[in-house]
Amino acid sequence: MDKTVDNRKIRKTMGEFKVVVLAGTAGTGKSTIAGELMYEFKDTYPDLKFIEGDDLHPPANVEKMTRGIPLNDDDRWDWLKKVAVESTKAAAGTNEHLSIVACSSLKKKYRDLIRHTCPESEFHFIFLYASKIEVLKRLKTRKGHFMKADMMESQFRDLELPNVKEEPDCDIVPLDSKTFYQIEKDVIRVVKRKVLEVA
């Protein structure tokens, strides 16, 4: 089923809830950056919630990835819907109506599905982008995650970095040749400017 829509007419809407989606391939530090955002905004938004998208995969998906089998579109549809629903529920449970979720959101049609599953939420996708060489380097040092280094080829095949003119609710933060501190500051800057609308 083709879930792609034309996003050239997307306009900033006053969604009832706001969800920051940290997107990108495995190995780009989505969950780590989410933790830094939670710390950065803990005083201003004390009940801010974070959803780890990987935790929402059904057992069948986890089993496939554990065996080194890449997921296909059919594996992902229900998972993406759950990501949209759970992150919206998390935002609804806070005074600020704001949440953060880590979700790869690799293809445009995946992002479209998230948007249209919960139209009451204003999703903003922040893509953490690193080269394949950099990601493989990062993955080799990770333990306890089901994504194997040899599965990265499929992730980069699926990756459709957004054209921000066509998807104005997306931003890309390059990671290569940057310190973690620089990356963190870049992401915080995007969240403040595009999501929270503060300087």
Image: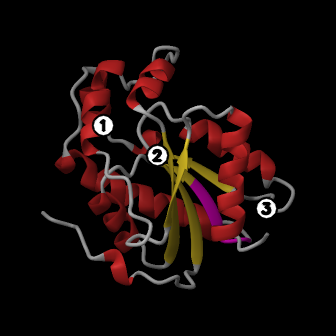
Magenta portion: prevailing SS class: strand
Residue 86 circle label: none
Amino acid residing under circle 3: Tyr
Q: Is residue 105 above or below residue 195?
A: above
Identify residue for label 1.
Answer: 155
Query: Is the Cβ of the residue at disc 1 closer than 8 Å to that at disc 2?
Result: no
Identify residue for label 2.
Answer: 53
Identify residue for label 3.
Answer: 45
**Residue at the location (65% across, 60% down)?**
190
- Segment tinted magenta in the rendering: 96-100
Of circles 1 and 3, the one toward us is: 1
Q: Is residue 44 left or right of residue 108?
A: right
**Crowd class of label 3 (few under 14; some 14 to 19; many from 20; radius 10 Å):** some
Magenta-colored stretch includes residue 97: yes
**Residue at the location (52% across, 74% down)?**
122
How many marks can you see?
Answer: 3
Q: Earlier in the sequence, mark 3 or mark 2?
A: 3
Find residue 128 and report its horizontal and vertical position in percent.
Answer: 52, 45
- In the foreground, 86 or 154: 154
Which residue in the rendered view is the most extreme toward the front? 177
SS category of the residue bearing label 2? helix
**Crowd class of label 2 (few under 14; some 14 to 19; many from 20; radius 10 Å):** many
Q: Earlier in the sequence, mark 1 or mark 2?
A: 2
Q: Is residue 4 left or right of residue 33?
A: left
Of circles 1 and 2, the one toward us is: 1
SS category of the residue bearing label 1? helix
Q: Is residue 89 above or below residue 25?
A: below
Which residue in the rendered view is the most extreme toward the right? 43
In the picture, which quadrant includes the N terminus?
Answer: bottom left
Find residue 153 and report its horizontal and vertical position in percent.
Answer: 27, 29
